[in-house]
């Protein structure tokens, strides 16, 4: 069963699905390596999102249940 995308205006303080407070931000693109970057990865403060970026990618996720969170409004519905 496909679940609807959870849209929020900012990073949630806790996951509405499982209640965990461990929410990590996605980092898109090709980040430069540093010790701080490695520590944030190991500490699950950030998640690597990859280098292919779309108009409607999640910006954060629950570390415990892997629920993705998307911006409240997406950029796919722009009018011309």
Image: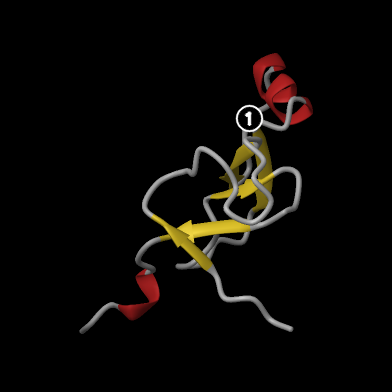
Q: Nearer the viewer, residue 63 or 47?
A: 63
Residue 20 screen position, x and y as percent: 67, 40
Q: How many numbered marks have been drawn onto this rendered protein structure?
A: 1
Residue at image location 71% in from the left, 15% down from the top: 35
Residue at image location 64% in from the left, 45% down from the top: 19
Residue 70 screen position, x and y as percent: 49, 60
Residue 15 screen position, x and y as percent: 60, 48
SS label for mark 1 = loop
- The answer to whether 70 appears left or right of 2 in the picture is left
- Residue 1 lies in quadrant: bottom right
- In the image, is residue 71 above or below residue 14? below
The single residue placed furthest to the front in the displayed view is 19
Residue 26 screen position, x and y as percent: 59, 45
The single residue placed furthest to the right in the displayed view is 42
Quadrant holding the C terminus: bottom left
- The answer to whether 41 appears left or right of 72 in the picture is right
Q: Nearer the viewer, residue 50 or 22?
A: 22
Residue at image location 55% in from the left, 70% down from the top: 5
Q: Which residue is mark 1?
A: 32
Please name the colour scheme applied to the rendered image.
secondary structure
- The answer to whether 38 appears left or right of 49 in the picture is right
């Amino acid at each position: 069963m496909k679940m609807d995308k959870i849209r929020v205006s900012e990073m949630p303080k806790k996951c509405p699905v499982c209640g965990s407070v461990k929410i990590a931000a996605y980092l898109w693109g090709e980040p430069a390596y540093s010790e701080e970057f490695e520590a944030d990865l190991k500490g699950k403060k950030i998640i690597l999102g990859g280098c292919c970026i779309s108009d409607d990618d999640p910006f954060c996720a629950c570390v415990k249940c892997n629920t993705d969170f998307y911006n409240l409004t997406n950029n796919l519905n722009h009018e011309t």
